[in-house]
Image (tube, rainbow, N blue to C red):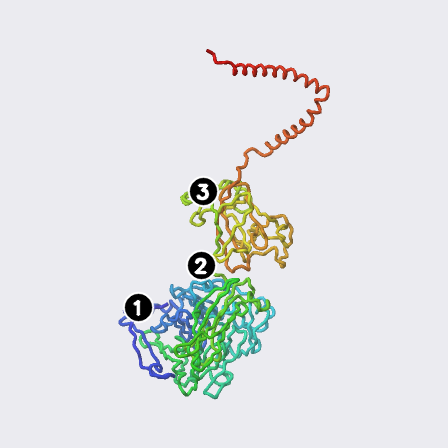
Amino acid sequence: MLKLAGPRAAVRQLEPSLVAGSGDDERQCAHTQTLEEGGVLCAASRSPGDEDQLYFSSTRAHLIKHPCKKNIALYLGRQIFFTRDNFKSSLLPLSIPASMKVGTPEVTSAHIADSVLLLVVNQKIYIYDYEANSWNASIGIEHPVSHVSGDNCCYSGHPFCVGYRFQKFAYERQAELVGSLGGIFYFHSLSQVGVLLIDQGKARFGYSEHPLNSSFGLPFDYNGTLDILITPGQKGILIFWFEKSLLVSRNSGQLVYPVHVKEGPNTLYSSISEANITIHSVAANQYELAVLTQENNLYYCSLGILSSSLIKFAGQNLWSQEAALMFTDVGRVEILTPLPDSVFPAFDFQKCPVNIQAVLMDPQLQVDVCKAELLQGEFDNKMYTIDMNSKLELTALMIPRPGMSLVPLVMVSNPHSLGLQAIIYEDGYTYDGNTKHRLNISLRQQHHWGRADPNFTSSIKRPTGSTITLDIANKEISCVDLKPLTALISVGCDQEKKIVIQNEISACHKGILDPVGLQDNYSYVIEKEAYDPNFQGQKASEDLVVDYQYQKLGCPHLVYYNTPWKPVVELWREGKFQEVIKAEFVLLEVHGLFTYTYSLTAQTALCRAQPQNWTTIMENPGNKGPFAWNRENYVSCHDPDNDAPLRWPNVPYQILGGPTANKVIFDQRNGIYVFYVSIVDPYYSYCHLETTFSVYVYGAFPLSIIPATVTIIPLMVAMLLSVWLAYAVPKLLHTEKGLRFKGFWIHPCRRCRKACACFRGRCRVHQGSPAWS
């Protein structure tokens, strides 16, 4: 952005002129001009050949306001101006460096995305980062571009609102399309990409995702080239306009209808063309629409849930070819006109503010008084997340004027994804005696309400979004300050959720490991025969020394090697325990240890199809990294739609939890295992719930160094020989050879018996004789 240099700027107010309104302070056109006191413009010294001054292709001026940063706006006309202070300072026309080689510096479309401007210049997209004051050409877009569209999410820090990028879009039903392409839009309010199709004076929207991708929106008249304005707030409100047409859609193009025009209390026209007016500029915010015509008239209407008509304000000298409309706040409109400075190459902006509420008080307009005193809810302008199997409760307070009755209306922009139920009841009285009405709103994923046909609901596997709006039916146009209550609902991952492995009995608790030692640079060795760094179950070439991460893992859970085991996985949210997870999950030892298996096979797990395993996941080129098994690529072998044949029924079944009683069985090896765990059930949560934890396996006797065959074969021979001798010796003693053999051993035994008896007799004499004197 080009900035002014020199001493502190001064602001001077020029002669005011009258505009529509009531009250002198609201009927003045403020012409602000910021000059340099003795300074010069820093851009004045630049050579004209260094930059190309941009200009807008349309003869009508446009103004694009940043929906989140209220002071940032872009004016598109014969010159283009970018402001960061709501046009309070003098501005130089926006130029692009000549080094970008844009050719003809004509801008056909623009969009503000976070901290950058996206400009379509000579059929190419250029990006101006106004924070860094740098220009770049977009990458990857090879074809000519005419327009760019987008939306802004004003809820910072949430993944729903982070990032922007271009990606190639392929419409599945493109072969069926007839006519020309009028535009491509991403509707956050519907979680759909919308394609505008034009054919023979009619237009309609096609959509990218189920269930809207099977049909088109209703056709509407498309006369001329319509500019399409996506109003801020993700409510799905679209404004279609050109000189002789003004159309509105409140559901992202599914229904589009003309805006009625009201001129006086008794005159109502069904369209802009019937009213015979020519539109010059259009402005809209979340709640209101304003139109400036070439006939020097200003029109206004509210953008509530139900349709309303444009109301004509008293005519004043407002229009010029360079004039543009802008909402500065709810009920506050400014008509801006750039004026060249007579001395400097900068432009000042004439501002004509209009207070809508004050104008509507004019008795000539015969506007009804607002029937509501209060519409209040803590959820207004906030963002919430609803994960799978979760719900959200919202409350609002509504107070009517004395003697009036109100009918609340609650609407979601994406009913295919988000379902609601509302209950209203009386909740006491105000000090003035007015009845207070409390509204309780329950929100759940539409799929889980069980009230909608599956052909109506969005795919439950896909995260979506929706807005919820609470308004009053047939609300009077005078209720300018009583704006609808709106919240953005992300039907997706709840970032506050995490999983924790239950660790009631640890190796430290039993005294097997010392927590002090684990924190003191503790390390252990994994034998090369027990791990594979490539996770393929092959032996490594050398032992692995592992540094234990106590701060991350804590003390290992204690597991006996000979007992089938399954970790207990807990769900926590915002530091509070929620439940024990019963959904399907998978484990993988992070260092490649493969000295464990599973208690079930594909067959005993009653799989209908061949189950996935870590090998098949890692072999898939679309999965990056060894820990790529998650809810997005998991396919259950029990799914009736899974047609993978069961070719290897005896392979280990590597999925835990869910409908099976599968468990882990460790080999005869003591030591530490560090496991990665991932919840793969796609219907449990939109989050990638994953963590790492450690276990210590104990109780396994060391494996013998001597090969088993060396000990088992002699033992078996000895056992067989003993059995044979027990059978053969008694039988042999009754034969002639056996008697001779028996006689041979009798004589030595008798002599041995006599010797033993003599020895025993001497001992008895010795023991019984008196002591020697």
Point out the image quarter for the N terminus.
bottom left
Front in this rendered view, residue 246 or 608: 608
580 left or right of 15 in image: right
Q: Which residue is mark 1?
A: 5
Q: Are marks 2 and 1 in contact (CB under 8 Å)?
A: no
CA distance for labels 3 and 1: 72 Å
- In the image, what residue type sits under mark 3? Gly
Q: Residue furthest left?
A: 38
Q: Is residue 84 visible?
A: yes
Q: State which tag comes first along the sequence, 2 or 3.
A: 3
* Crowd rating for badge 2 (residues with CA inside 10 Å; few <14, some 14–19, many 20+): few
Q: At label 2, which amino acid type do we have?
A: Glu
Disc 2 to disc 3, how far (Cα)? 32 Å
Of mark 2 and mark 1, the one earlier in the sequence is 1
Q: Nearer the viewer, mark 2 or mark 3?
A: 3
In front: label 2 or label 1: 2
- Badge 1 amino acid: Ala
Circles 2 and 3, Cβ within 8 Å, touching? The answer is no
Give the answer, above or below, for where 68 lies relative to 500.
below
- What residue is disc 2 on? 574
Q: Which residue is mark 3?
A: 511
Q: Residue at x 72, y 22 (%)?
A: 734
- Residue 201, given in percent of the width and then of the height, sits at 56, 78
Disc 3, SS: loop
Give percent across and percent down for residue 725: 67, 26
- Whichever of callouts 3 and 1 sits on the residue coming sooner in the sequence is 1
Q: Could you tell whether 592 is left or right of 176 in the image?
A: left
